[in-house]
Amino acid sequence: SFVVRAWTAGYDIYAPRRNLIKHQYRPGRMGLPKFWGSVGRTYGRDGPGFNTHMQTVMLQRIKHMVGYPEVSRAKIIEGGHEEVLTDLEHYSMGSERTREAYLEFTNIDPATHQCKAMQWCNRCQLK
């Protein structure tokens, strides 16, 4: 969601050829909390299922913004998930570039659910 919104607002995408920063991933068996569990802890709804529902809602919102046909506005409303559309006018695409230009740039085809190789990334060049 952030990348498509930033790119359509005029920000360029940069993909370094090597990792510049990283984080230490600690296995769950060490008993340390993961960032994805913080939502449930914050709202007092820890346990399996809470994040799954939230992720489902967020993915619907992102897919709707990107243009996946199965997550059209009508289908979201028909499915009773209007929360996906909340404040979309404030947190959606920018006005410097179009969503269609982003999809072409990144070689993403929502209609066929395909993400093809981005040749510009491998050559360190922009179109």
Image (cartoon, rainbow, N blue to C red):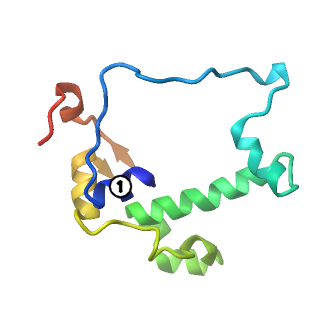
Q: If the image is split into quadrants, where does the N terminus sit?
A: bottom left
Q: Is residue 68 visible?
A: no
From this view, report whether residue 80 is shown above or below residue 125. Answer: below
Viewer-proximal residue among 13 and 54: 13
Q: Looking at the picture, which amino acid does disc 1 mark? A: Ala
Q: If the image is split into quadrants, where does the C terminus sit?
A: top left
Q: Is residue 120 left or right of residue 75?
A: left
Please report the residue visible at 86 percent of the width from the left and 55 percent of the height from the top.
45
Report the residue that reaches farthest toward the left.
127
Q: Is residue 56 visible?
A: yes
Coordinates of residue 41 in the picture (x, y in percent)? 83, 49
Coordinates of residue 59 in the picture (x, y in percent)? 55, 56
From this view, report whether residue 47 is shown above or below residue 71. Answer: above
Please report the residue visible at 32 percent of the width from the left and 66 percent of the height from the top.
94
Viewer-proximal residue among 77 and 47: 47
> Dot 1: what SS?
helix
Viewer-proximal residue among 91 and 111: 91
Categorize mark 1 by other alpha carbons within 10 Å: few (<14), some (14-19), many (20+): some
Q: Is residue 62 left or right of residue 125?
A: right
- Quadrant of residue 50 within the rendered picture: bottom right
Please report the residue visible at 19 percent of the width from the left and 28 percent of the height from the top.
124
Residue at label 1?
Answer: 6
Please report the residue visible at 73 percent of the width from the left and 51 percent of the height from the top.
51
- Quadrant of residue 95 within the rendered picture: bottom left
Coordinates of residue 73 in the picture (x, y in percent)? 48, 77
Coordinates of residue 85 in the picture (x, y in percent)? 54, 75
